[in-house]
Image: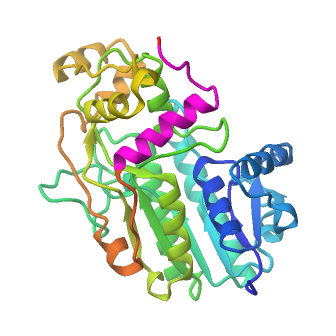
Amino acid sequence: MNDGPVLVTGGSGFLAGHCILALLADGHEVRTTLRSPAREAGLRGALAAAGIDPGQRLSVIAADLTHDAGWAEAVAGCRHVLHVASPLAAAAPRHEDELIIPAREGTLRVLRAAHAAGAERVVMTSSFAAIGYGKILTRPYSESDWTDASAPGLAAYPKSKTLAERAAWDFVDGEGRGLELAVINPVGIFGPLLGPDMSASILLVKSMLEGRLLALPRLMFGVVDVRDVADLHLRAMTNPAAAGERFIATADDFMSMQEIAQALRDRLGPAADKVSTRVLPDWLVRLVARFSAAARQAATPELGRTKNASSDKARAMLGWEPRPAVEALAATGESLVRLGLVAPGR
């Protein structure tokens, strides 16, 4: 490749690791940012365990979304940037600005550095959370839809993703004019882990396999495999038609938590013996939410709501073909067991 290194922000993350793996497999030189250089050895080990020893084709720069230091060095000489890093709290933050400010300002920090360095295109990882919350639709959500960030009861995470993506589009329409932007809006990302770092989606499966969810709220999620989301980032990076576009990444129709649990039981056998498929009535979730922080996260306006989204645009424009959702779920559980991150059965 003659385009210089591709920068992937937040290289220790679940999706970022798979983006790095896909880029290396495709012959690219890769540069990535880590908040702590001490994590480089773990990243290299995870990539090698997945079948690719990056050697000199991977370089690491220390940079944090909340500080300017390191970003000019990180983007220098890069034609393409995959901005994957984003703050995500394991629990609800004490104040929504704990997520919103780092997400928005971190995105702008990366875009400003890329623009100043003369990068051609940034592919930003946003989320379906920036599309499908705060309002009710009777049709599947599409890329033309936006989450209503002012909607009552909207959680901090979808608000942060919405405001960060809005800020990105405003930047390339204003002071960042000339920098191309493409945005990927994935639903819940599942699939094989490269190491012990887990996203919220992976933690959901881990909790199910460990039997810690004795009954399930009536919530629905889209499911997509992390390998397919990484592939979509590469397609959006190289396809001229992707500039200025958003792409929803979802494999199939949305699944209820009960359907996700049943898929794990069907595909994993004894390893999923602890997975419960019992469903909690909505009224009970709302009652328990008065006393439980975990239940309050479930007792959102999404409780009991049917929703769906379409990835037709990514399939038609970029030739993207994701794995079935059940394969992504099975790969999640299999890797958790293989890595010893969950007890296999009773």
Q: Position of residue 127 (x, y in %)?
A: 43, 56
Which residues, given as a range, are shown in magenta?
325-345
Image: 178 above or below 192: below
Of 229 and 295, the residue lying toward us: 229
Residue 206 in the figure: left or right of residue 285: right
Q: Position of residue 240 (x, y in %)?
A: 50, 88
Q: Main secondary structure of the magenta part?
A: helix
Of 176 and 283, the residue lying toward us: 283
Image: 300 above or below 278: below
Q: Position of residue 178 (x, y in %)?
A: 58, 89
Residue shown at 18% from the left, 34% from the top: 304
Residue shown at 32% from the left, 73% from the top: 313
5 magenta-colored: no
Q: Quadrant of the N terminus?
A: bottom right
Residue 211 figure quarter = top left
Residue 195 figure quarter = top right
